[in-house]
Amino acid sequence: MKPLLAKNLKSFAQRFNNFVDGELRHVEIVTPTTISITLATQDTARAFDWITIKLEFSGVSEAKLVGKLSFVDMSEGITLLYEDNVFALSISKCSNLSNIKTSTCHIIGADLKCQEGSF
């Protein structure tokens, strides 16, 4: 896994079109403060081939997860941002950390790593 830096979040999200119409494949609580999430999406850097992306949040301070992944609507994609010295992810379109905290599915943590995999 490679660290995902705050300065690279925007280009990372753009590369995958903010995961719009992607698939939420897997959520794993690795430890009480580490959560990984696996998504399938199209990669603009690979002629829109489908790949999987694993995101791992460590130092998790807040999370709201769903049990039935197949019911998650990814039509709005995800929001990834760095605000107030934390990384935040929401399965919806949000404009700031406050909106993310009220979303149906979110993770907030101190560090973020990513790993690309095959579809």
Image (cartoon, rainbow, N blue to C red):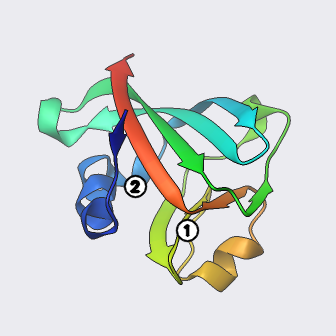
Label 2, secondary structure: give it.
Answer: helix
Mark 2 neighbour class, 10 Å CA radius: few under 14, some 14 to 19, many 20 or more? many
What is the CA distance from the residue labelled 2 to the residue labelled 1? 9 Å
Left or right, residue 111 beside residue 46: right
Measured as percent of width and height from the top left, residue 80 is found at: 47, 63
Which residue is more in the foreground, 58 or 119?
58
Which residue is more in the foreground, 7 or 24?
7
Q: Residue at x 42, y 44 (%)?
A: 113
Measured as percent of width and height from the top left, residue 37 is found at: 59, 37
Q: Which mark is residue 18?
A: 2
Mark 1 neighbour class, 10 Å CA radius: few under 14, some 14 to 19, many 20 or more? some
Q: Residue at x 28, y 54 (%)?
A: 12
Q: Inspect the image, locate mark 1, and give the three-letter code of the amino acid beneath it.
A: Lys
Q: Is residue 77 visible?
A: no
Q: Inspect the image, locate mark 2, and give the three-letter code of the amino acid beneath it.
A: Asn
Left or right, residue 51 beside residue 107: left
Measured as percent of width and height from the top left, residue 72 is found at: 71, 42
Label 1, secondary structure: give it.
Answer: loop
Q: Residue at x 34, y 67 (%)?
A: 6
Q: Residue furthest top?
A: 118
The N terminus is located in which quarter? Answer: top left
Res 117 → quadrant: top left
- The residue singled out by tag 1 in the image is 93
State if disc 1 and disc 2 touch (CB < 8 Å): yes
Left or right, residue 36 beside residue 45: right
Q: How many marks?
A: 2
